[in-house]
Image (cartoon, rainbow, N blue to C red):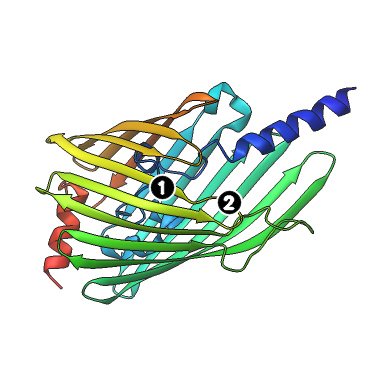
C-alpha cells in the first residue's frame, strides 16, 4: 500500500509539473513569461540566452519558489552567474525541482554574442538529470537557441527554440518538450516596457502571453502579466537599489490557485538600472 501511495504521489507531481511555472525568474513569472524579447537579466540563460550579450556587466542571481500551489514537494530554486568579456558573454546556472521521490537537477552553460550593432545570438546547453525513487535515474542534454534584434532603439523582437535536439528521458518521447517562443518588446517613455509573446510547445496549443513592466518611481518597478493555455495571470514588484535587485512574483492558476516566487540579483559595476545600462552600452556601439 505504501508503494502504491508513492507511485500515485509521483504521478500527481508529474502532472502538476506543467502548471508549476518552474522556469526560473521571479520577474519572468510576474510578466507571465512574455519576455523573450525583453531578456535583460541573468535568467535569460533559461529563456533567451541572446539577451545576455546586451549586458556588459557581471551578475549573480538566485531564485526560489518554496511551495508552489501549497505543495512543498514542488519547490524549485536556481542560481545563475553571468560574466561579460571581450569575446562575448558567458553564464552558468544550476536549477533544482522536486523532492526525494521525484527530483530534477539541471546544469547549464551559455554563450552569447553581438554579431552586429543590433543583433544578438546565444545558446544554452543544459545537462538534465531525472531521478524517481524505485525507478532509477536518467540524464539528457538539451540545447536552447535564441536571438534578439533591435528593430529600433525602443522596439525589439526576440525568439528562442528550446530542445532543438528533441532530447528526452528514457525511451519515451516528449518527456522534455520542444518549445518555440516568438515575441516583441516595446519601451514606452523609457519607464514602461510592454511585452507580447507566443509560445508553441510541439503537440500542444499555442500560448499567448502579455506583460507590462513599469518603473512607477525610482527604485521600484510594478509588473503584471497574463496568458492562456493555461489561463492565468501574474503580478510582481522589483526593488532596485545600488547593486541589489529584489524581485517578488505571484502567479495564479484558474484551477490550482496562487503561488509565490522570490529572486535576488547582484549587478556589479554601476548603480544605474539595468535598462539604463543596456541603453548606454548600445549607444557606445
- In percent of width and height, residue 254 lies at 49, 27
Check the image and name the residue furthest to the front.
205
Q: Residue at x 49, y 43 (%)?
A: 78
Give the number of marks. 2
Check the image and name the residue furthest to the bottom.
116
- In percent of width and height, residue 264 lies at 35, 38
Check the image and name the residue furthest to the right.
1
Which residue is denoted by mark 1 in the rendering? 208
- In screen coordinates, is 107 left or right of 247? right
**The one of 123 and 190 positioned closer to us in this rendering:** 190
**Residue 67 appears in the figure:** no
**Residue 119 appears in the figure:** yes
Helix or strand or loop: what does disc 2 sit on?
loop
- In percent of width and height, residue 36 lies at 36, 55
Marks 2 and 1, how far apart at CA: 13 Å
**Pointer 1 local density, CA inside 10 Å: few below 14, some 14–19, many at least 20:** many
Amino acid at each position: 500500500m505504501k508503494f502504491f501511495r508513492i507511485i500515485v504521489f509521483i504521478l500527481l507531481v508529474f502532472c502538476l509539473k506543467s502548471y508549476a511555472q518552474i522556469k526560473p525568474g521571479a520577474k519572468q513569472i510576474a510578466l507571465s513569461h512574455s519576455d523573450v524579447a525583453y531578456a535583460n537579466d541573468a535568467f535569460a540563460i533559461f529563456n533567451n540566452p541572446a539577451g545576455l550579450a546586451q549586458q556588459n556587466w557581471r551578475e549573480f542571481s538566485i531564485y526560489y519558489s518554496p511551495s508552489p500551489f501549497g505543495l512543498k514537494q514542488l519547490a524549485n530554486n536556481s542560481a545563475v552567474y553571468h560574466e561579460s568579456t571581450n569575446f562575448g558573454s558567458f553564464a552558468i546556472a544550476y536549477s533544482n525541482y522536486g523532492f526525494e521521490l521525484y527530483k530534477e537537477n539541471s546544469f547549464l552553460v551559455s554563450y552569447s554574442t553581438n554579431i552586429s550593432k543590433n543583433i544578438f545570438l546565444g545558446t544554452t546547453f543544459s545537462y538534465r538529470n531525472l531521478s524517481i525513487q524505485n525507478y532509477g535515474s536518467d540524464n539528457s542534454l538539451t540545447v536552447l537557441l535564441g536571438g534578439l534584434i533591435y528593430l529600433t532603439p525602443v522596439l525589439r523582437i526576440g525568439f528562442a527554440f528550446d530542445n532543438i535536439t528533441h532530447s528526452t528521458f528514457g525511451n519515451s518521447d516528449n518527456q522534455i518538450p520542444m518549445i518555440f517562443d516568438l515575441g516583441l518588446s516595446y519601451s514606452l517613455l523609457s519607464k514602461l516596457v510592454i511585452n507580447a509573446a507566443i509560445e508553441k510547445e510541439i503537440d500542444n496549443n499555442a500560448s499567448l502571453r502579455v506583460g507590462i513592466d513599469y518603473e512607477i518611481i525610482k527604485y521600484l518597478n510594478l509588473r503584471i502579466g497574463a496568458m492562456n493555455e493555461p489561463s492565468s495571470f501574474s503580478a510582481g514588484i522589483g526593488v532596485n537599489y545600488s547593486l541589489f535587485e529584489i524581485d517578488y512574483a505571484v502567479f495564479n492558476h484558474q484551477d490550482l490557485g496562487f503561488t509565490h516566487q522570490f529572486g535576488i540579483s547582484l549587478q556589479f559595476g554601476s548603480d544605474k538600472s539595468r535598462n539604463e545600462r543596456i541603453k548606454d552600452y548600445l549607444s557606445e556601439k
